Image (cartoon, helix red, strand yellow):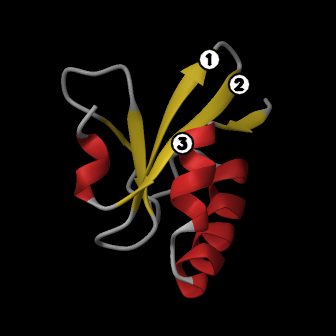
Amino acid sequence: MKFFYSPKFIRSFSGLPKDVQNLFSQKETIFRSNLFDSRLRTHKLKGRNEWIFLITYKVRVIFVFEGKDILFVNIGDHSIYRK
């Protein structure tokens, strides 16, 4: 399984505070070893072909499965749900 980052994800990530970026790195390590680790609270978004996992209570990552690979689509607060 390979992991990719969309341009939108990279832009959003660069705008986050350093402490949240560091926390993402920790959670990403967990995610890469077990996508559904209970600490991540991974779940599918209702009515969409996208999934999320939590970084903090307010910050989450949207991702999609692309075959055997994962694409990180966006990161941020609830406003990232809007298309």
Look at mark 1 in the image and give the residue it sits on. 66
How busy is the neighbourhood of tag 2: few (under 14 within 10 Å), some, or many (20 plus)?
few
Please give left or right for residue 82 compared with residue 59 in the image.
left
The image quadrant that residue 77 belongs to is bottom left
Mark linked to residue 8: 3
Pointers 2 and 1 in contact (C-beta within 8 Å): yes
Q: Which type of secondary structure does the marked residue at label 1 adopt?
A: strand
From what the image shows, is residue 54 above or below residue 61? below
Q: Earlier in the sequence, mark 3 or mark 1?
A: 3
What residue lies at 60% left-to-right and 74% top-to-bottom? Answer: 21
Instruction: Identify which amino acid the numbered label 2 is placed on.
Output: Asp
How busy is the neighbourhood of tag 1: few (under 14 within 10 Å), some, or many (20 plus)?
few
Q: CA distance from mark 3 to mark 1?
A: 17 Å
Identity of the residue furthest to the top in this view = 67
Q: Nearer the viewer, mark 2 or mark 3?
A: 3
Instruction: Identify which amino acid the numbered label 3 is placed on.
Output: Lys
Pointers 3 and 1 in contact (C-beta within 8 Å): no
Identity of the residue furthest to the right in this view = 2
Q: Nearer the viewer, mark 3 or mark 1?
A: 3
Query: What percent of the width, then of the height, locates residue 42?
Result: 41, 48
How busy is the neighbourhood of tag 3: few (under 14 within 10 Å), some, or many (20 plus)?
few
In the picture, which quadrant includes the N terminus? top right
